[in-house]
Amino acid sequence: MRFEGFGDGALEFFDGLQADNSKAYWNDNLAIYREHVRAPMEALLAELEPEFAPGFGKGKVFRPYRDVRFSRDKSPYKTHCGAVIEQGRGGGAYYVEIGADGMLAAGGCYHAEADQLARFRAAVDTDIHGARLEKLLGALVDSGWEIAGETLKSRPRGVAPDHPRLDLLRHRTLYAFRRWPSDDILYERACLDRVRQAWSAVRELNQWCADHIGVAEKKRR
């Protein structure tokens, strides 16, 4: 299936889901989700996989159901549709999602087990790999990206208070993202180029994550 943009009803579907996150709404609008959201996202991912997946990871579209086991929010459905190419959580990811507010693209480390975090901090601690990461992140910020991730309030144990990359060492996860509000491009084939350009911008960050964080030794449950 060739990607031609998301369906006209995609964002309207998510607007409704935000207002009524119920099984009744979901069932009543399932056909719209499948045609206007899920199928286009699968087509988008399929066209980008040959460029970004080889030697890096595999693509998938995320399930629409929320994991509510440990959450106070028991609403059953995600209010966005996301897709990713990754080898395993933490070692870099090409991510894209659409929701009521528009589109988001991102790349980097979204999750880190203990062994991944240890490798990340060891790499950041070195002048070569740490400085390289600083340079990559600075270039992304200069071109309109935002840097985010889970961070410690204090410095990690054993890290000097005057470490030149203390702010980076506080990170437990680290990723770059950018957003686009709802516009006509979302419904056109040009949306493919938008995501391709965004993923190209985070390619070096993802490769840094793959080289220096890698896949967790411990399998997630």
Image: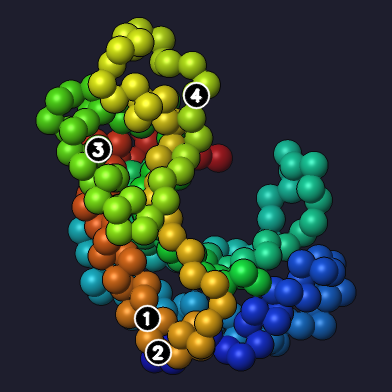
**Residue tagged by mark 2?**
189
Circles 2 and 1: CB distance less than 8 Å? yes
Name the amino acid type tagged 2. Arg
1 or 4: tag closer to the N-terminus: 4
* Secondary structure at numbered mark 3: helix
2 or 3: tag closer to the N-terminus: 3
The mark found on residue 152 in the picture is 4
Q: Is residue 140 left or right of residue 128?
A: right
Separation of residues labelled 4 and 3 (CA atoms): 18 Å
**Residue tagged by mark 3?**
134
* Residue 203 in view: yes
Q: Could you tell me which residue is drawn at 37 percent across and 36 percent down? A: 216
Name the amino acid type tagged 1. Leu
Separation of residues labelled 3 and 1 (CA atoms): 29 Å
* Residue 159 or residue 119, whichever sits in front: 159
Separation of residues labelled 1 and 4 (CA atoms): 36 Å
* Residue 113 in view: no
Name the amino acid type tagged 3. Glu
Residue ranking furthest to the left: 128
The image shows residue 170, relative to residue 178, as above or below, that is above
Q: Position of residue 133 (x, y in %)?
A: 24, 39
